[in-house]
Image (cartoon, coloured by chain):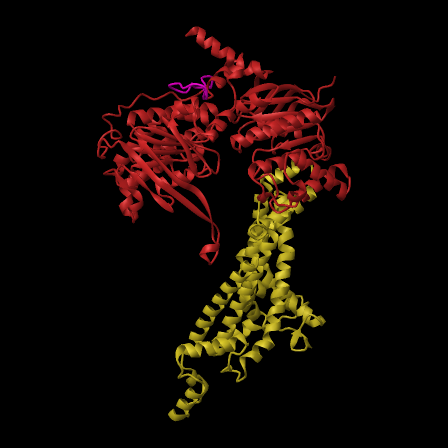
């Protein structure tokens, strides 16, 4: 078990270093960092002095090590556009994105899994067919269109929900949350649904397919033949086995919820990381882009690590080495 | 006395768009407490449907459309789902074929047993656990108190089937339906499981329906036998009578088609009763044909294949440190020779390394040590695929499972032509198609099969396609890895006869791998016995069967299902005619 965790951690570090290298290359070699920082009228001597002071004359590996070391502490330098430390900007924006992603993920799982199970068990039911048809729409409509339609309907025509921003937020010692105020919660509804819809339909279809597969297995048949009640067979036997493969895909999907929040954040003018990133691209704000890249990679790595641990917890077959087997 | 199970005039139908398929018709049988009734028949005869109909587990749209089923006098065929569930497990236990897939992999044995016991008997967690341990003890699991906390994957196949039996008996049912309970197991394990089932039935006075395609299992276990053919019972009787003196034509031909362990015959007797079998096509003169011609091998090597100190290790525990890695030695310093034109058998239980040898010889695996010499060429010395190709072409493989060894998205003609194109053996596409047509005729399928897809064929016919594909490169060495284990007795006889004919006509050398001793006896000239990766004994087939020199060979021979004893009458008849 410890060996397993150690291996996984080691792999995670490698992944993070690779991403950091790409981010660093972006920072160092796309455009001239000096040019981006100083004005037109800076003299060549001043430029050279600045270059020396920023350590841009040092060997590649020393620069990279410095970059990686700073990144590990959350330091990504100064934003060219905002003239503030990137870490400050991120700290401001991160809670918005994480809250949105988390609520979306919970929505996607809490609705997607039961719907998947239901459509698998009542394969030919009217409601199942309705779910399946709706899910097809959910998969095929682009996210921004769903967002715009929601805004049009609930925001503009019915005027029930705010169409942009986070509403009022409460500051909890560095973490701003919109979950504690009414306007914050109301603002969250539409972006969260927009972001969750695609994942929800995907999870539903995945759970359904896996569940149908598991329901055909011998151990389900044998459980039925032992006279165990449907509730037991469906939820204790079948669902648990269904979740083994679902966990992997879901884990990856949660990562992409955070990454794909960009589009939803743009549509709803949600003041999160995604919006920050889009603006950074527009203004060639490379430190912000590098920071975003590293952060997203970090989330993916953490989620994957958690998924591997979950796998370990759910499936006893993976534990065979640790327990000695036979 | 009321019979335990009384089935009268049962009829089961599967409605479909093209009309109703009658799976069982007019089935009548009785079972007394403590009695074991064997139900035999080939696949599709409706054996398993009986079990499903009695326990109310018919897959929709199947339904009972006639007759009645009584358990201790009460009708159970017309119950609703709720009442049925109360009977299942509680009064009727079921045992399925594959112990590897019958248990929930994510729950401990303990959980599965306790939940089943507590659901039916409502005795509480503690009492249920005590009973569970007791059950495991009864089915012969050592250290039940420790092993109960383990997961299914921590048990071997035979042990898992014992757990399955414990689960089936958990709520003390009166009737057990065992559907091919030992088909997936090795002979030695099979014998133990059958013994266990037998003694449990006697002790607990549980009636058992034993569904199987294996006459040997029936002979060892059942009190009475019911023979099924295409959904009907053709004959019911006491086991000794059915096996020794069958009355119905189908039973007679079925029994005569079982490969005889006790003597060697030229050809396998066919199940002649089967209606609508394809005619054997007119013979192709192989001498003048492409298949026989221009076989561009240097003639007259005495030894076709030679394996020397062949070793294969699989990594079972990874580690950064060499010393901490653990290996499983699947093949352990095995040496043997296969002479030209010889059929060499390898026999052994699962996990003995038979199939690994086949894979080493064909180059699917690279050996960890030792060498394979084929027609004078050391195959292990060939480094690239291109170098090995001409040699690989001369050896072809026929696999066990005809359902997964053919690509379902390709037409038969393309499947068979693939190796011809790959090895560039034909000048043109037309020539290749001509060869394919002849090959299909040769294996008894007919040229019309060419445009169809594999799923349109039965298991036996698919195995013929595999054989045609293997012959397409004009090989001189065939590797058959359990070629008939997935087939019914009657089909097995046809396929083995075909292989034998082809072997003689084309003077093929064959490595024939099987766990089935009677089949080995009929097919092979010499046999090697394997166990735990080691080759224990190599002998002429007749010598091995009459005077086995290794203890393990004797043990294996002892475990062969004994039909001879029951067959005495028939043997005597045969002698008097001779």
* Residue A85 x %, y %: 54, 82
Q: Give the range drawn in magenta.
A: B259-275
Query: Residue B321: where, in percent of width, then height?
Result: 46, 58
Observer able to see residue A152: no
Q: The red chain is which one?
A: B
Q: Quick check: B104 above or below B509?
A: below
Left or right: where B242 falls relative to A67: right
Q: Which residue lies furthest to the top in this view?
A: B576
Numbered disc total: 0
Depicted B327 relative to depicted A78: above or below: above
Taking the magenta stretch, the answer to whether it contains residue B270 is: yes
- In this rendering, does residue B283 appear at all? yes
Q: Choose between B387 and B420: the one closer to the eye.
A: B387
The foreground one among A325 and A172 is A325
| Percent x, y of residue B179 | 59, 29
Q: Position of residue A79 (x, y in %)?
A: 51, 81
Instruction: Check the picture and name the quadrant holding the N terminus of chain A.
Output: bottom right
As rendered, which of B432 and B215 lies closer to the eye? B215
Q: In this view, does B515 lie to the left or right of B222?
A: left
By secondary structure, the bulk of the magenta-drawn segment is best described as: loop
Indicate whether B388 appears above or below B198: below
The quadrant in which residue B308 appears is: top left
Q: Which shade is chain A?
A: yellow
Give the quadrant of the C terminus of chain A.
top right
Residue for point 44% across, 71% down: A22
Q: Is residue B265 magenta?
A: yes
Q: Which quadrant holds residue B574?
A: top left
């Amino acid at each position: 078990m410890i060996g397993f965790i150690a291996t996984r951690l080691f792999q995670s570090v490698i992944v993070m270093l690779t991403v950091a290298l790409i981010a660093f290359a972006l920072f160092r070699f796309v455009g001239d960092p000096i040019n981006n920082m100083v004005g037109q009228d800076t003299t060549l001597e001043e430029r050279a002095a600045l270059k020396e002071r920023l350590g841009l004359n040092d060997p590649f590996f020393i620069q990279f090590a410095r970059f990686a070391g700073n990144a590990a502490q959350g330091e990504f330098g100064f934003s060219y556009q905002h003239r503030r430390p990137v870490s400050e900007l991120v700290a401001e924006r991160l809670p918005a994105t994480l809250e949105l992603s988390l609520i979306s993920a919970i929505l996607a799982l809490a609705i997607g899994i039961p719907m998947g199970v239901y459509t698998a068990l009542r394969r030919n039911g009217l409601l199942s067919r309705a779910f399946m048809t709706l899910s097809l729409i959910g998969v095929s409509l682009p996210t921004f269109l769903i967002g715009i339609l929601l805004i049009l309907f609930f925001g503009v025509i019915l005027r029930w929900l705010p169409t942009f921003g986070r509403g009022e937020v409460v500051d909890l010692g560095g973490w701003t949350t919109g979950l504690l105020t009414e306007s914050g919660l109301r603002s969250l509804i539409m972006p969260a649904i927009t972001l969750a819809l695609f994942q929800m339909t995907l999870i539903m279809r995945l759970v359904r397919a896996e569940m149908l597969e598991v329901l055909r297995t011998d151990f389900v048949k044998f459980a039925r033949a032992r006279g165990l009640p449907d509730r037991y067979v469906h939820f204790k036997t079948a669902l648990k086995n269904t979740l083994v493969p679902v966990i992997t895909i879901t884990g990856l999907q949660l990562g992409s919820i955070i990454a794909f929040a960009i589009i939803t954040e743009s549509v709803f003018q949600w003041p999160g990381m995604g919006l920050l990133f889009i603006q950074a691209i527009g203004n060639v704000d490379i430190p912000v882009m590098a920071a975003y890249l590293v952060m997203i990679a970090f989330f993916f790595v953490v989620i994957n690590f958690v998924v591997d641990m979950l796998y370990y917890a759910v499936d006893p077959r993976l534990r065979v080495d640790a327990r000695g087997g036979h | 006395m009321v019979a335990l199970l009384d089935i009268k005039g049962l009829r089961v139908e599967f409605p479909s768009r093209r009309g109703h398929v009658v799976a069982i018709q007019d089935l009548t049988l009785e079972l007394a407490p403590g009695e074991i009734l064997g139900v035999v028949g080939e696949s599709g005869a409706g054996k398993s449907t009986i079990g499903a109909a009695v326990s109310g587990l018919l897959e929709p749209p199947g339904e009972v459309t006639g007759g009645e089923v009584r358990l201790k006098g009460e009708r159970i065929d017309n119950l609703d789902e709720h009442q049925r569930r109360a009977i299942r497990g509680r009064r009727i236990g079921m045992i399925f074929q594959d112990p590897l897939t019958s248990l929930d992999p994510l729950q401990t044995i303990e959980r599965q047993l306790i939940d089943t016991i507590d659901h039916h008997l409502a005795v509480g967690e503690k009492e249920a656990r005590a009973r569970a341990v007791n059950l495991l003890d009864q089915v012969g699991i050592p250290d039940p108190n420790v092993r109960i906390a383990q997961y299914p994957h921590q048990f071997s196949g035979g042990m898992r089937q014992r757990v399955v039996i414990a689960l089936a008996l958990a709520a003390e049912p009166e009737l057990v339906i065992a559907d091919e309970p030992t088909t997936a197991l090795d002979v030695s394990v099979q014998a133990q499981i059958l013994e266990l089932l037998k003694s449990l039935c006697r002790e607990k006075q549980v009636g058992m329906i034993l569904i199987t395609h294996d006459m040997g299992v029936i002979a060892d276990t059942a009190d009475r036998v019911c023979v099924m053919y295409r959904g009907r019972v053709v004959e019911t009787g006491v086991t000794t009578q059915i096996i020794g003196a069958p009355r119905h034509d189908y039973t007679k031909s079925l029994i005569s088609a079982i490969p005889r362990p006790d003597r060697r015959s030229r050809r396998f007797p066919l199940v002649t009763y089967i209606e609508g079998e394809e005619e054997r096509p007119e013979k192709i003169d192989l001498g003048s044909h492409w298949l026989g011609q221009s076989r561009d091998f240097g003639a007259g090597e005495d030894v076709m294949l030679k394996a020397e100190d062949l070793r294969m290790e699989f990594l079972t525990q990874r580690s950064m440190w060499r010393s901490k890695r653990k290996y499983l030695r699947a093949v352990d310093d095995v040496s043997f020779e296969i002479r030209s034109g010889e059929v060499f058998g390898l026999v052994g239980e699962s996990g003995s390394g038979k199939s690994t040898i086949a894979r080493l010889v064909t180059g699917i695996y690279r050996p960890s040590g030792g060498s394979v010499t084929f027609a004078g060429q050391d195959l292990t010395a060939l480094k690239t695929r291109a170098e090995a190709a001409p040699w690989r072409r001369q050896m072809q493989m026929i696999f066990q499972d005809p359902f997964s060894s053919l690509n379902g998205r390709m037409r038969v003609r393309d499947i068979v032509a693939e190796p011809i194109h790959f090895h560039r053996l034909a000048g043109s596409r037309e020539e290749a198609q001509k060869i394919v047509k002849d090959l299909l005729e040769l294996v008894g399928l007919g040229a019309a099969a060419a445009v169809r897809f594999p799923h349109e064929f039965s298991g036996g016919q698919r195995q013929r396609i595999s054989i045609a594909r293997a012959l397409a490169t004009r090989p001189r060495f065939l590797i058959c890895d359990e070629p008939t284990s997935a087939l019914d007795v009657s089909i097995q006889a046809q396929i083995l006869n075909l292989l034998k004919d082809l072997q003689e006509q084309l003077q093929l050398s064959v490595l024939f791998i099987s766990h089935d001793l009677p089949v080995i006896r009929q097919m092979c000239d010499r046999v090697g016995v394997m166990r735990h990766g080691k080759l224990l004994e190599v002998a002429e087939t007749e010598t091995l069967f009459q005077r086995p020199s290794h203890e393990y060979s004797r043990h294996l021979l002892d475990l062969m299902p004994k039909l001879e004893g029951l067959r005495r009458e028939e043997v005597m008849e045969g002698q008097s005619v001779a």
